[in-house]
Image: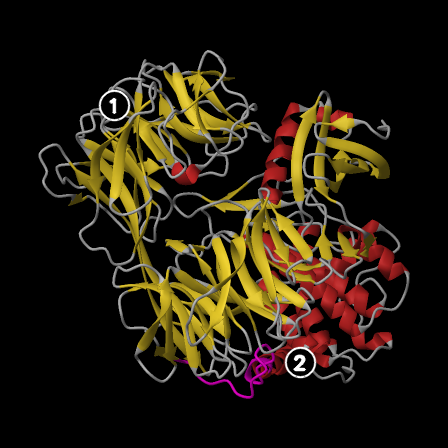
């Protein structure tokens, strides 16, 4: 079936066909919502009409969408329209590796560049438990800007782990063990035998591709499929050095190890293979490797691998990544000693002076100047400023309005410049999130809000990038030709990716998505940028990553604990801060004169409060739990009780149940008993892709929640015993960083944010929404009162002022206020709940403390615990 130009599939407008095959047709299309070109793949109708296949395909699409790596084809959407099932992917311009190989000779350098990017992409997949199982030149795409993209995970298998640590693999009729899966010529021996294939199978396939790139011939050949499969099982390919090229000895050994028949003798991870490829790329011998006698294969391989290991070690010793002359143990010199929160820090041009913005001793943020060799700091006027950059002329770029919530530093204010010696700042631009000086010291690059988007100008006046998300940092390269960007997609979240763009707006590099990104700076080489990030499953230890303009990336250092990178001086010294933060839970009852700390571990976030104030429901998502858990604790101080895994929840009217979203990406709903008994899940439905903010309606038999159908968020109601959810509002906005109770006490209304972020009250009978009278821009909703005529709101500041807001008149009355006794490091209220009568309340707040260090003699070869 061919689709005509102009045909619409949801928001995607078909432009022209790109190709067709047994697995469907691919079209060039335009995403009309985001104004971008995409590729749309239409599945054959025989698959589209098969509900089991469609469910499997949807699961695989979600699995791959979670990868989000620069060397893996990005999947934007998977949808069904009528009897058409289709995928939406990024549109690539270039050619497959197979097509490039057909054109002839590839240099050794080019072979290594391609192999390194494939290894990086496969490593990212393996870290998510995903094994490709069909790596071949046809499934590797080379873009016009020299980016490698891995395609077609149709035979991929995902391996997960259950609660007891046992392996759980998703399998179906197409992926079950015993079947020979893959492409003849690139399958591993275990695939040929129909045995289970793990991550080392992909390493074998990559070795076969690398062999073909280097030699121009396939590693395993034969007149038939059977002969090729027999060669994979029993024969060794001719040595790469015999192909007539000057193949480095270390590369011959590397390929030999990848193609070992025994998985235990191959590289044990794609990440290790990537490091070995980098070592060869960076300077291993280019001499031709002599043929290896088969009788001495393993002895010779062992000796050669020792040589390769020495090359890897030497690459680190000479400091290829750092441009340093020796690898010595780093030292950490403490710069700040007063308790508080470090917001940002930069070296001055002389390298001895350090300028930093901080909130110390419970005061407002301000600028401080200190010396790397002196423990004292001098405060600069005025207050409420944070440094974003220091020019080579000693001029500061500063901004007002930065705040820290946990590890997140969010700046959004007026950009100004001022001398490093102090003085009145000169305003430059409003609504700025990040800025940095160009090398000449007379121009700035900025990221600022314009019409709902964050716009990056490099320099001011030259727009190079825009995003609907937000940007926490931009840094100009030493050459002044590139700009490093930390982009976050979700408000209130420090998860995101690193981008490198040039002055024309060309995107040179885009990293994978990290769950946390905390600072970046250019290294001594203008072609390499360092950043601190956390990956999923990495706990609370941050890693120092590097990425260069060619797309190579890796981990330089692993810090024990949360760390932020602020700056790197030209002699290699770094400014980092050690971050220590927790979310605490305080409660004050009817007869309490003081607040009581009901925190359990290190991130206790209240999500609901029993109407009589007798118990709190809260999340624990910090370092102590394995995953985000829901806990119940009596407000008399009794020990907390773990209810189970959950991402958000609410009490039932009788207090016997909790409705909760799971910690899965979809956030499916479940009922958890607060006492004895078994929990039960609420049957999922294909209508809903993601759930959030569940709660009970007053009858106790129905629930209300926000959910997305894959495109739009709405409020839904549903019977707790099942049935289809019913949409009760038009399209709305989701803001889980200020999550609140949805349903009114009479069960007739919900209050939510519209698409412009404004709070409004919606009737569950479908009546038009009405605005909330008397609501101020800084108000945050908490919960409803005793009836549907008033609500409680508060402000994200200390002391926390809680108001009762009359929804009929807009009249507001101060009900109470909360504040921890110790004001040092306070920076943000996570959530707040009041009893309906307003006589008791519980809230969670952030306390963030940090210490600034100068790191000397950094080698990037080990992990470090900061003093």
Q: Position of residue 544 (x, y in %)?
A: 49, 67
Assign a secondary structure to mark 2.
helix
Q: Position of residue 746 (x, y in %)?
A: 32, 14
Task: Name the quadrant of the N terminus.
Answer: top right
Q: Kindly report which numbered mark, 2 or 1, lies closer to the viewer in this rendering.
A: 1
Q: Report the side of 564 relative to 157 (left or right).
A: left
In the depicted structure, whether residue 551 falls above or below residue 592: below
Residue 191 shown in magenta: no
Determine the residue positioned at 76% across, 73% down. Answer: 109
The residue identified by callout 1 is 656
Work out whether residue 120 or residue 131 is closer to the camera in this orientation and state it. 120
Q: Residue furthest bottom?
A: 325
Where residue 393 sits, quadrant-wise, is: bottom right
Residue 320 shown in magenta: yes
Assign a secondary structure to mark 1.
loop
Disc with the residue nearer the chain's start (2 vs 1): 2
Task: Name the quadrant of the C terminus.
Answer: bottom left
Is residue 541 in sight in this rendering? no
Where residue 638 sits, quadrant-wise, is: top left
Work out whether residue 845 or residue 240 is closer to the camera in this orientation and state it. 845
The residue identified by callout 2 is 300
Q: Report the side of 229 relative to 814 (left or right).
A: right
Determine the residue positioned at 21% across, 46% down. Answer: 819
Residue range (magenta): 315-331
Determine the residue positioned at 80% across, 69% down. Answer: 214
Q: Position of residue 60 (x, y in %)?
A: 62, 39
Q: Report the side of 519 relative to 227 (left or right).
A: left
Q: Position of residue 132 (x, y in %)?
A: 66, 50
């Amino acid at each position: 079936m061919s689709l005509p130009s102009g045909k619409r599939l949801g928001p995607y407008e078909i432009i022209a066909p790109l190709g067709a095959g047994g697995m469907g047709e691919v079209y060039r299309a335009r995403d009309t919502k985001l104004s971008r070109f995409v590729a749309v793949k239409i599945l054959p109708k025989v698959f589209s009409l098969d509900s089991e296949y469609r469910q499997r395909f949807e699961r695989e699409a979600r699995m791959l969408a979670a990868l989000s790596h620069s060397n893996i084809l990005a999947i934007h959407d998977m949808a069904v329209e009528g009897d058409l099932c289709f995928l939406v992917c990024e549109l690539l311009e270039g050619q497959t590796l197979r097509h490039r190989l057909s054109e002839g000779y590839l240099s050794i350098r080019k072979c290594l560049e391609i192999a390194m990017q494939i290894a990086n992409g496969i490593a990212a997949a393996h870290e998510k438990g995903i094994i490709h199982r069909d790596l071949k030149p046809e499934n590797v795409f080379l873009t016009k800007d020299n980016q490698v993209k891995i395609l077609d995970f149709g035979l991929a298998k995902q391996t997960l782990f259950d609660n007891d640590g046992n392996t759980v693999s998703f399998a179906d009729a197409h992926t079950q063990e015993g079947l020979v899966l893959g492409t003849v010529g690139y399958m591993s021996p275990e695939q040929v035998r129909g045995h289970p294939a793990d991550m080392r199978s992909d390493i074998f396939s990559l070795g076969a591709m690398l062999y073909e790139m280097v030699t121009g011939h396939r590693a395993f050949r034969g007149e038939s499929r059977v002969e090729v499969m027999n060669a994979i099982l029993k024969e060794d390919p001719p040595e790469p050095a015999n192909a007539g090229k000057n193949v480095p000895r270390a590369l011959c050994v590397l390929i030999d190890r990848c193609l070992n028949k025994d998985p235990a003798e191959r590289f044990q991870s794609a990440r290790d293979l990537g490091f070995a490829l980098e070592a060869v790329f960076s300077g291993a011998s280019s001499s031709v490797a002599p043929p290896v006698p088969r009788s001495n294969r393993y002895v010779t391989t062992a000796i050669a691998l020792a040589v390769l290991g020495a090359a890897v070690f030497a690459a680190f010793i000479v400091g290829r990544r750092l441009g340093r002359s020796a690898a010595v143990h780093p030292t950490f010199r403490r710069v700040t000693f007063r308790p508080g929160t470090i917001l940002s820090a930069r070296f001055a041009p002389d390298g001895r002076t350090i300028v930093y913005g901080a909130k110390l001793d419970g005061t407002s943020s301000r600028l401080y100047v200190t010396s790397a060799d002196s423990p004292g700091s001098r405060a600069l006027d005025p207050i409420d400023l944070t440094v974003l950059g220091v020019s080579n002329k000693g001029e500061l770029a500063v901004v007002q309005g930065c705040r820290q919530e946990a590890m997140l530093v969010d700046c959004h204010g007026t950009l100004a410049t001022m001398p490093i010696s102090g003085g009145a700042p000169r305003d430059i631009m409003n609504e700025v999130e990040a800025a940095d000086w160009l090398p000449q010291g007379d121009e700035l690059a900025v990221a600022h809000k314009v019409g709902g988007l964050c716009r990056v100008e490099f320099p001011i006046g030259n727009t190079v990038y825009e995003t609907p998300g937000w940007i926490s940092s931009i840094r100009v390269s030493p050459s002044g030709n590139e700009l490093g960007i930390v982009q976050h997609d979700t408000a209130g979240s420090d998860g995101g990716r690193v981008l490198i763009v040039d002055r024309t707006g060309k995107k040179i590099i885009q990293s994978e998505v990290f769950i946390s990104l905390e600072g970046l700076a250019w290294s001594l080489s203008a072609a390499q940028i360092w950043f601190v990030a956390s990956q999923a499953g990495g706990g609370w230890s941050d890693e120092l990553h590097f990425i260069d303009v060619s797309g190579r990336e890796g981990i330089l250092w692993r810090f024990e604990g949360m760390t932020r990178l602020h700056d790197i001086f030209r002699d290699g010294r770094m400014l980092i801060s050690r971050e220590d933060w927790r979310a605490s839970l305080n409660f004050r009852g009817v007869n309490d004169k003081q607040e009581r700390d009901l925190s359990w571990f290190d991130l206790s976030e209240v999500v609901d409060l029993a109407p009589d104030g007798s118990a709190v429901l809260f999340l624990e998502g910090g370092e102590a739990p394995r995953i985000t858990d829901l806990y119940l604790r009596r407000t008399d101080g009794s020990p907390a009780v773990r209810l189970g895994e959950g991402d958000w929840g609410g009490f039932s009217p009788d207090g016997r149940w909790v409705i909760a979203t799971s910690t899965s990406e979809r956030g499916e709903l479940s009922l958890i008993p607060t006492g004895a008994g078994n929990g039960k899940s609420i049957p999922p439905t294909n209508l809903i892709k993601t759930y959030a903010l569940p709660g009970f309606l007053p009858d106790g038999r129905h629930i209300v929640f926000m959910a997305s159908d894959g495109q739009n968020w709405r409020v839904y109601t549903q019977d707790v015993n099942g049935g289809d959810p019913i949409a009760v509002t038009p399209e709305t906005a989701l803001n889980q960083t200020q999550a609140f109770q949805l349903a009114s006490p009479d069960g007739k209304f919900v209050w939510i944010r519209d698409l412009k972020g404004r709070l409004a009250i919606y009737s569950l009978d479908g009546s038009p929404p009405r605005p909330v009278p008397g609501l101020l821009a800084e108000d945050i909703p908490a919960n409803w009162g005793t009836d549907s005529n008033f609500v409680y709101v508060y402000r994200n500041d200390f002391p926390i002022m809680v108001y009762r807001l009359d929804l009929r008149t807009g009249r507001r009355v101060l009900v109470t206020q909360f504040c921890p006794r110790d004001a040092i490091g306070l920076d943000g209220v996570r959530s707040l709940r009041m009893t309906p009568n307003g006589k008791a309340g519980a809230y969670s707040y952030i306390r963030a403390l940090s210490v600034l260090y100068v790191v000397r003699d950094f080698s990037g070869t080990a992990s470090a615990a900061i003093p």
